[in-house]
Image (spheres, rainbow, N blue to C red):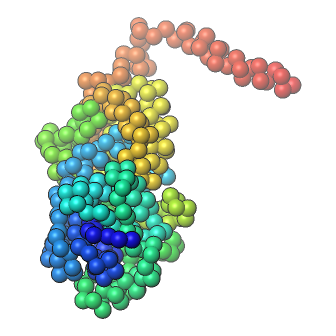
Amino acid sequence: MSIKKIVLAYSGGLDTSVILKWLKENYDCEVIAFAADLGQGKELDGIKEKALKTGASKVYIEDLKDEFVKDYVFEMFKGAAIYENYYLLGTSIARPLIAKKQIEIARKESADAVSHGATGKGNDQVRFELTYYALMPEIKVIAPWRIWDLNSREKLINFANKNGIPVPVTKEKPYSSDRNLLHISFEGGILEDPWREPDEDMFLLSVSPEKAPDKPEYIEITYDRGIPTMINGVAMSAASLFEKLNELGGKHGIGRVDIVENRFVGMKSRGVYETPGGTILYHAHRAVESLTLDREVLNLRNSLVPKYSQLVYNGFWFSPDREILQGMFNEMQSVVSGVVKVKLYKGNVIIAGRKSDKSLYNPEIATFEEDYVYDQKDADGFIKLNALRLKIRNMISK
């Protein structure tokens, strides 16, 4: 493959650090490193200097935190996305944004190729490349894990040491992690044994529920058309709101998940996740919906959650089917406004109250006390009509 210039999705971790050097050696061309700031914090410290020292001709570092939360995470939460009942898709939803910006840089720099650090066994290779091809069909893609012989963490570490590349992974502690404002994930290495409980010192965003405060904390989250806008009456930017919820959730041991999930490529994988702020918002959002969404509209949306979540997980963010579903969800969310009172306590998100000017809940109708708006005798015919098919089934089975 004849390549003139490559834009590499660069994190500064083990894989992409080695890949940067490997691309320079094998393609003898200019390599531009791109790092997306999605809320990794100190992980980005010194990343520009490291990339240049490793061989990058240029380094882009873009602050995408607000765009990530506002245009990707919040949009995804409108669809109540959750993969296989537990995973709030923290890594999945970050990849299309990173890949989109990578393509924008490739166009700006007249690069003819892009590269990433995803392995040939994982989901990320699909997420990156589906986005590349959706946005720039003619782009060339280099996926080193599918073509090189550095096929283990140990070989990567040895390559890095040989070439003087500092990496935050050791042979003694070889699991990998991925962090953004929505979550942090851990996989591989010592976590590949699904019977082994994760070490407590691995977790970065949360305390264990056992060590969380003994006193619950109440907070109020305000929603406007499906989007959280305030905490305790204080308006915040998308990124700031998420940072605050991560702080509160982590303090109370909220959002830890340890699952064996089904990857798109066909194998099972064990992943450990911390999603404190996202877990709070997932439950709070559903609480507002319970007041404001029509029953059948809510049922329709819920029936589509598995499909929508699968599209996000598998990397089809820039697909017509995901966009059509998103349009429908956005329309549904036009009435999802209100305030949710949440109790945070030892790993639990407990809905303590909800209110909305758009509420469909009418206490005068729902009351068990005397009322004048509902004739209980009407229920007789309603039940008999619904029982008709059950009666007929019993009659013909005798």
- In the rendered image, the residue lying farthest to the bottom is 162
Percent x, y of residue 98: 28, 58
Residue 205 shows in this picture: no
At x 30%, y 92%, the residue is 162
Percent x, y of residue 92: 38, 56
Residue 277 shows in this picture: yes
Q: Quadrant of residue 112?
A: bottom left
Q: Name the image quarter holding the N terminus.
A: bottom left
Seen in the picture, residue 124 relative to 119 is either above or below; the reply is above
Percent x, y of residue 125: 41, 63
Q: Name the image quarter holding the C terminus.
A: top right
At x 25%, y 51%, the residue is 68
- In the rendered image, the residue lying farthest to the right is 398
At x 45%, y 10%, the residue is 374
Seen in the picture, residue 179 relative to 226 is either above or below; the reply is below
Horizontal relation, residue 106 to residue 347: left or right: left
